[in-house]
Image: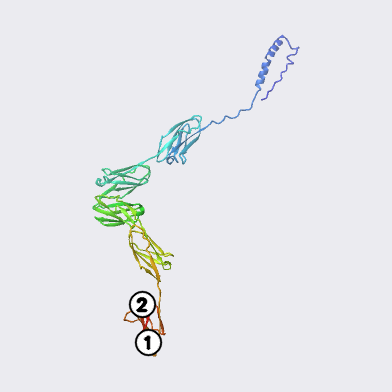
Amino acid sequence: MRIERKRCSLGRLLSPQSMNSRIRETLILAATLLPVIFLCGCAGVVSSQKAAGSPAPQTYSISGAITPAAGGSGATMTLSGAASATTTANGSGSFSFTGLADGTYTLTPSHAGYTFSPPNLSVTISGANVTTGLNFTATPQTYSISGTISPTAGGSGATVTLSGAASSTTTANSSGAYTFTGLVSGAYTVTPSHTGYTFAPTSQAATVNGANVTGINFTATAQTNPTYTISGTISPTAGGSGTTLTLSGAAGATTTANSSGAYTFAGLANGAYTVTPSRTGYTFNPTSQNATISGANITGVNFTATANPTYSISGTISPAAGGDLANVTLSGAANATTMANSTGNYTFTGLANGVYTVTPSYTGYTYAPASQAVTVNGANLTGVNFTATAVQTHSVALTWTASTSTVSGYNIYRLTGAGTVYIKINSSLITTLAYTDTTVQNATTYTYVATAVDSSGNESLYSTPATANIP
């Protein structure tokens, strides 16, 4: 601010030459008004800089959420009222509008395939953000699949199964009509079933896409010779898996339970049947079950498998020289082989009750006893022992004097024990004057003779006998 004062000259006003009474009166009035004039003059010359621009009006936000996230995520939120805008809810279903002035607004959510509760909300901004009470609940829109099974004889009471985007079963009414409700959009398969009937088609695909699906119809045909099934489960699976099931009665068949212990006999006519499970190492409760088919499948023919206890047979072959690596064979109620260890010990395990025979063998040894019969009856068997004896091998060395005639070679004949017939033991003509017999047995007496053979094949008489006693 600056103050400019105009100079006021009073010289001329106070000049005595020009002063008269009237002027004096004027001067008195002027003197009286002078402070006011100065004040007015000063006020007229006050000035200041121009003021700054006005501040922008304050804005606020509105925020909330749509639950559950499946219906909220990607939903469109529309704002109307004091201002208009749209936004998209994030992956958690949360939404927000910003930059809003005071006023009244309406929020309206939308999302294909969903309805919302409430359908909209009114909100008033009054000098603050609004962050509470602005929530919506999204509910998937649902539809129906319906149809009819005809004629009513086959449709009435038929079971209809829904699979695919959802699973359900329903029963067709007395007119053969059925309906599945509360379905979201998706792909489904509808399959009818009714004992004694076949259906055309056997199943149908139906796609719900924002509208009810109608006219999924089937035709039921009565079976001329209907057949049925008997099924069940053997538990636990350790005993059920692989179990053989035998069917007897009105028809005979066998089947094997699957890895879950489940089994089924199919194609069965009405009649009385018996189901019997069997598996080595297991007993079953009950041991068998009767099942009578009378116009319907039979389920729940179940069994419980219990593993049978098993036992062992063990022993020792001594001395260790004859037991080490000896083969031991088990026969009878079960068959197996094992090898004795370095100290001659052996064991057979996992054996059920029954009668068995144990037989050791090893080249160069004989065993006493040669084998043993044993019976397993609810307990392990030990001490099934054997004694090994090394087999001593012998041979007989024969020599003779050359024939005085010209010969091509010689033959050797042997008589065993008290026998009366000599048997030739050489496979080809002997051209030397010696032969060794390596086929003799222990504790046996042998008698030998030789013959000479000329070039024409003529053979001489037996020589003087020679006897050998093998210990």
Q: Secondary structure at mark 1?
A: strand
Q: Secondary structure at mark 2?
A: strand
| Disc 2 to disc 1, C-alpha distance | 27 Å
* Residue to which mark 1 is pinned: 452
> Can you say which quadrant of the picture contains the C terminus?
bottom left
How is the protein colored in the picture? rainbow
User: Does residue 147 appear to the left or right of 46 in the view shown?
Assistant: left
Q: Nearer the viewer, residue 115 or 66?
A: 66
Q: Position of residue 14 (x, y in %)?
A: 74, 13
> Can you say which quadrant of the picture contains the N terminus?
top right
Amino acid type of the residue that numbered disc 1 sits on in the rendered structure: Ala
How crowded pointer 2 is (Cα within 10 Å; few <14, some 14-19, many 20+) is rated as few
How crowded pointer 1 is (Cα within 10 Å; few <14, some 14-19, many 20+) is rated as many
Q: Position of residue 36 (x, y in %)?
A: 66, 16
* Residue to which mark 2 is pinned: 444
Residue at the extreme bottom: 405
Amino acid type of the residue that numbered disc 2 sits on in the rendered structure: Thr
On screen, residue 422 above or below 72: below
User: Does residue 149 appear to the left or right of 209 in the view shown?
Assistant: left
